[in-house]
Amino acid sequence: MTLDRIGLYDPARESSACGVGFITRKDGTPSHDVIVRGDAALCAIPHRGGMSAEGVGDGAGVNVDLSAEFFGALVGEPLEPGRFGVGNFFLPDDVAQEDEARRVVTEAVEATGLEVLVVRPVPVDHGAAVPAAERLQLPILQWVFRAPEGWDRTRTDEAANQALLAIESEAYGRPELAGLYPLSLSTRTQTLKGRLNSNEVIPYFVDLLDERHSVRTLYFHTRFSTNTEPHPTMAQPFRLMAHNGELNTDRKNRLSDEALARAKDRTIVRPHGQSDSSRLDQTLQSRVFDDGLDLVEAIVALMPPAWENDATLPQHVRDMLEYFSLYEEKNDGPAAVIFSDGDVVGARLDRLGLRPLRTVETAEYLMVSSEAGQLHADPDEVLHRGRIEAGGMLTFDHRTGRQLRSREALELLAARRDYGALLAEARTPLDAIALDGLERGDDTLGYEGDLSRSGRYVSYSLNQESFRFLMDPMLATGGERISAMGYGNAIHALADQEGGMAKYFSQRFAQVTNPPLDSIREADGMTFRVALGAKPDGGASATHQLVVESPILSQLDMLRLREQTLTPSSASTSSTRRSWATPTPTRPRWSRRWMRWRMRWSPSRARPAASPWSPTAASTPSTRPCRCCSPSRRSTSASSRPACDCASRSWRRAVSCRARTTSRAPSASARAPCTASAPVCAPRSSSPRPPAPPASRPTPTGPSTGSARRRSSSWARRWAVWASAPSRATSAASSSSRTTSTPATPCSRAPSRTSTLPSAAWASPASPRRRPTGTPARARCRPTGRCRCWGSSRSAPRAPATASARPRCAASPS
């Protein structure tokens, strides 16, 4: 069996199209005639199963009740129904591991308190199948066990389920036991299947031909492997159900199951290469045994009808289905499911009903099959013929002898609990959240100029090609667009047209319908409804969800999501924000380096208080002039600017102010005088830093003033952040030259503080093309310190003189 991805074959995309059905006695009396009728039904549908060129079937099997008469004769003592069980297993691929597999299964069964009575190979007749099929079959080993005295049926079921989970953990987790696969381990039913055609199943398993093998329910399955590799483990039925179709939401359902398991501190152990049908059976088993749901209730929750747009459903039924939707991700097909636990047997279609299920009822039997006429019955004996509708269901409960159709079953389930009260506590519609001061009008969705949802679609999703090939033919002739299946366009990241965020995602759900699904049925069976927040059974306390009718959000919807305090709670949100902003003393070195890098290139973001850039950020009051209030930072005059309380300013406030470096400089009269002498020029480096922009630059005039100002502000901010970084020593020679007493020489090439260069000329030092014609090129002076009174937009170049000979600024001790 090949389960790894090879070429175009991907085991994650496995699905099947098959034939299913069940037959049950309405009086609940076990009879061998049920198996005989089941054999006739299987012989009528060989065309619904796949077959190789050699005549080997893709897989077929049956699930039957445990016959107390047959297994009692097998063990040599009478057995009571419900107090004994049977486990059927495929053995490991490695023959040398068969003894180890026997030990694992036996110890797991006995560890739960059950008593093993018989271990035997299931007898088969290879002559019932084609000769080529014999080498492809897997031997089945069978365990028969019994519950101790005093155990009721519920305790026996729980013990068998615990043993099954323990065996799966060993079988799927140990590579040497690869191939060990439990077909079933239950106190109610057993499964027998293999690489067979449908007409070969009953003759192949010799036990089913024994007259003492009397049962009251049998359901069957024959497999057509459309895009998967046939294997006995892929054959159906499984333990609680058989599935015809494919589950197109399988990946979403797996992610939901994994998230729910982690929330409950559980682990899902899956077989290698598990199919979508097997995953659904495993989820169904977990809902019944782990969550305590009734089998019918679990089926409805996993595969609900299209209740969202069905106004004929009673309110209490709608409340139940909506509550189920809050914690269970629905399984969409096309899918027809047969299910049974020995007491209850039923059939269900998904919400679109794209797989047929026909029903026949007589005085003794209730039969469901994929095709009409598959189960023969004399016309005089037939009480009712029909079909199961889309999203419909038919069940029969042997405990009560009652047959239930879709509406009766839903109303019976909804009457068990007050789902209306549970729903009110678990969810709130997004439209029910009130916003003060904002109302939805006829022409606006919250602010002036907003578009309707249809207008947004036309604006952002349609282009000229859409109108030419889609809209225009529809408007002119009423004809719909006809195109081939598939999507041949390039990914949106490489497209030359912007169509919104949604174009960057691809659709994983694809449902093939024949005939094509019309818009009326699509509106009845599909919905965009989304529930946001933690699920009610996710392990969290006091959870609450927001229900959004469409993932396409308007302006008001965005405001409601921002202002709501229902989910997540305001306490958890504020706690998260505090933990993000609070500095951590033990932050790792890589985190500190990343923070420094991020803050260097993102000056508008606030740095943590423990950043190495500011070791005395909020502890020691500074006596220097506050940089955010430096005259070179603002265009207002010193007299009109309010006084700055430097000691009380937080470090974060200072950083945010520091980041707001504008492209305009104050006037000469508003700038504080500087006592520093003319800057000195250091030798030009091979890779000089960009020169400092002049401190005085008149505001440009003309039509390009606004754009030039915006272009210059980005360069000014980047230069300000770079200039504030600690300077680096150029070389050992320049370091030793500082110890000499050579006096500093004024730099004749230094830019004048009264330069008249426009902002567009100095804003981008790396672009000399912006320099106005006739303006001499400025010297590239390597700044090493900052004149505090000039602000970070001017830096004093390094002088090759001693520290005592360098000019000082009266505004700052540095």
Image (cartoon, rainbow, N blue to C red):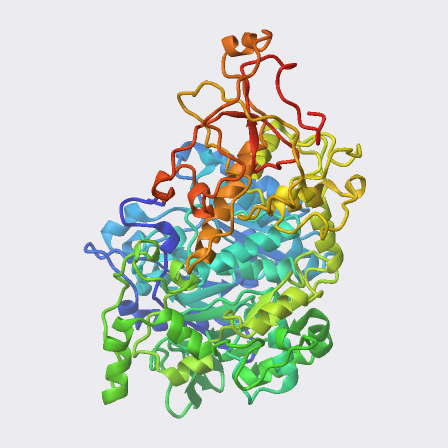
Residue 271 appears in view: no
Residue placed most toward the observer, 347 or 423: 423
Can you name the residue that lies furthest to the left here?
53
**Above/below status of 490 relative to 24:** above
Tell how many labels: 0
Q: Quadrant of the N terminus?
A: top left
The picture places residue 417, in percent across and down from the top left corner, at 71, 76
Q: Is residue 761 left or right of residue 545?
A: left
Q: Residue at x 54, y 40 (%)?
A: 170
The picture places residue 755, in percent across and down from the top left corner, at 49, 40
Q: Residue at x 70, y 62 (%)?
A: 543
Q: Is residue 440 left or right of residue 194?
A: right
The picture places residue 109, in percent across and down from the top left corner, at 61, 45
Q: Residue at x 71, y 66 (%)?
A: 566
Q: Quadrant of the C terminus?
A: top right
**Above/below status of 802 relative to 187:** above
**Above/below status of 496 relative to 177:** below
Residue 811 appears in view: yes
Q: Quadrant of residue 135?
A: top left
